[in-house]
Amino acid sequence: MPKVSLDMPNQILLDIKRHVGDDKKFVSVADAIRTACRKMLDQLDSIDERHGRLENDK
């Protein structure tokens, strides 16, 4: 799996970390970011589909 490096405002990282850990939604910060990216891509696909821009290349 490729690794990605990015700069992120500290406040966003702190907000993410509030949802990471035992008995929380995500097991790691990486898991939270991957999940957010998947959700964003699903939303963008939905928008593109509504506007007739989605190509069936998946």
Image (cartoon, grey):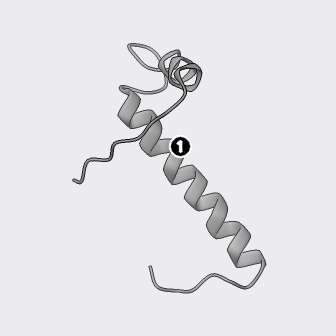
Q: x, y percentage for residue 23? A: 44, 14
Q: Amino acid at mark 1?
A: Ala
Tell me if residue 21 comes above or below residue 2 in the rendering.
above
Q: Is residue 40 left or right of residue 46?
A: left
Which residue is label 1 attached to?
36
Q: x, y percentage for residue 40? A: 59, 53
Q: Is residue 56 left or right of residue 5?
A: right
44 or 14: which is nearer to us?
A: 14
6 or 38: which is nearer to us?
A: 6
Q: x, y percentage for residue 7? A: 45, 36
Rendered residue at 50%/53% (across/down) = 38
Q: In the orientation shown, which residue stands out farthest toward the right?
A: 51
Tell me if residue 46 comes above or below residue 19 in the rendering.
below
Q: x, y percentage for residue 22? A: 38, 13
Tell me if residue 52 comes above or below residue 12 in the rendering.
below
Q: In the orientation shown, which residue stands out farthest toward the left?
A: 1
- Badge 1: few (under 14), some or many (20 or more) residues near its Cα, within 10 Å? few
Rendered residue at 66%/59% (across/down) = 43
Q: Is residue 5 left or right of residue 57?
A: left
Rendered residue at 53%/43% (across/down) = 36
What count of labels does the image hold? 1
Q: Quadrant of residue 58?
A: bottom left
| Residue at disc 1, secondary structure | helix
